[in-house]
Image (tube, rainbow, N blue to C red):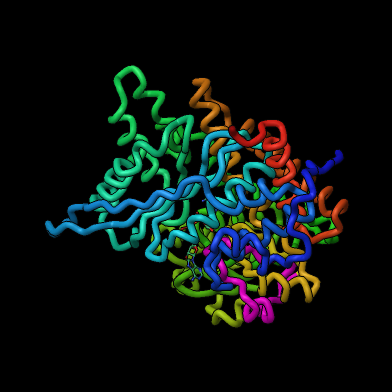
Amino acid sequence: MSITTATGQAETSAGSTSQDNPIFNELEFPPDPDNLYRQTVGQVLEATEMLGLPHRVQVIVAQPKNEIMVHFPVRMDDGHHRLFKGYRVQHNNALGPYKGGIRYHPAVHLDDIKALALLMTMKCSLSRLPLGGSKGGVKCDPRALSPGELQRVTRRFTSAIMNEIGPDYDIPAPDVGSNAQVMAWMADTYMMSQSAATSVDGRRVVTGKPVEFGGSLGREKATGQGVVDVLVEMLPDEGIPIEGMRVSLIGFGNVGSWAARILEDYGAKVVAVMDHTGALRNDEGLDCHALAAHVGQTGGITGFDTAGAVSGGGRHTVKGATPITEDEFYQTPVDVLIPAAMEQMIQEKQAAMIDCKVVAEAANAPTTPAGDRALQAKGVEILPAILCNSGGVTVSYFEWVQNKSNVIWDEETVDRELNKHMVMAARRAKVARQRFECDMRTAAYIAALDHIGRVYAVRGIFP
Ligand code: NAD
């Protein structure tokens, strides 16, 4: 496989580093170096320069097309009304309809959503999906809402952004704090607003739906499965066999728990896990199936050490676990560390403690630029998020295709097609790394931007 660059006219702003790009001034970016959007755009712009993309494409990818912010009232269970803030950011649709998750979290901010939307554009392009990038969210704590309140928040938010989404325009999916049930409410609300003749097809407006309501088999585990598919493709280059490999994970929600369970089934030892409730270690290998069941019942990993839960299903697992501190978690020696929680968790301080050979970014933007530099200085290979966690959007795309053509794929077909996409995305990034002699993150961005650059080159810029 080969990759050639979509070279543009020599309009690039040469000589800048990722965090002091002149385009920041031109587009009046916030000066804060800790701003996630600035950090993400900085890394993407560095890749555009290495690729030689024209200035016009650089500025287009540096800003989203649309930033939608809504405020909407919801009646709470005690009868009072609370005003919620919601976002939908549509970054780019050069490759196809906007596509991206909906996050429910108290710390949702516009610039974070913008960064996540940009990453969706990059992810879809790296995987060559005919989709663009978007992201949305509601500033709320879903754990503090009753099921009825959660449903009313979801329906009212969907209603507020009704004219901004659509099955062939912008297609939401689950993210942190939302799930298949939330997607079912979103789809139902959208369908109720359509004419009877178009209502059924309207369910394509979201993916990640429950299987009985048009969801795809294999979607729930898809992101975790994709992380594992990337590791299977990439780890031979690092000389790390999956069998017996030591793994730790930050986050044991959808993505983390599925990656952990699949790795355990493949023969790896998951020796440490941390989530928002605490951290656990077991050098013989945690029983991740039992731990996932415990998290399903209690909402977090804490208490697993005393719960006595054990499935006996894992090949390297023994009963129990020892609670450890956050610092002890980071210091645990492993072959592969999988961040699968929130953004910006691996900063310089954590990077200094981390003792691993590979970081596989299952979460979006888990490593700050300073954390990235510190890890690279220690010789750690970082497999970037737009590669590692693209399994979710890939199977979302499969769901959308199945809904559009009224067919149902069996799980074997989903897993096989997913694996093909993950392997091809990994190889595109590897080829770009060889060609440009850069790190994997920059290489993955280059492979993604090359595709987008070519589309702009043939389409031109209207008028
Ligand atoms: P989730 O809500 O199911 O799980 C999040 C996990 O992070 C939980 O285990 C939680 O305890 C943990 N966490 C939160 N704050 C923490 C903290 N301060 N310290 C330690 N752990 C903490 O979410 P998810 O769907 O698994 O998503 C995880 C990441 O993967 C996010 O970055 C998300 O954007 C990304 N992602 C998800 C999907 C998907 O299909 N769900 C797809 C692509 C990317």
Q: Is residue 206 above or below residue 177?
A: above
Q: Residue at x 70, y 46 (%)?
A: 448
Residue 231 appears at what percent x and percent y?
73, 54
Taking the image as shown, residue 88 lies to the left or right of residue 385, namely left
Q: 327 or 456, which is in the foreground?
A: 456
- Is 189 one of the magenta-colored residues? no
Q: Residue at x 61, y 54 (%)?
A: 259
Counting labels gives 0
Q: 443 or 143, which is in the foreground?
A: 443
Q: Quadrant of the C terminus?
A: top right
Q: 154 or 22, which is in the foreground?
A: 22
- Is 350 one of the magenta-colored residues? yes
Q: Quadrant of the N terminus?
A: top right
Taking the image as shown, residue 288 lies to the left or right of residue 80, namely right
Q: Residue furthest top?
A: 197
Which picture quadrant has residue 348? bottom right
Residue 151 appears at what percent x and percent y?
28, 47
Which picture quadrant has residue 458? top right
* Residues shaded magenta: 331-356
Taking the image as shown, residue 53 lies to the left or right of residue 287, namely right
Residue 131 appears at what percent x and percent y?
58, 37
Q: 185 or 236, which is in the foreground?
A: 185
Residue 92 appears at what percent x and percent y?
56, 43
Note whether residue 125 is visible.
yes
Note whether residue 265 is visible.
no
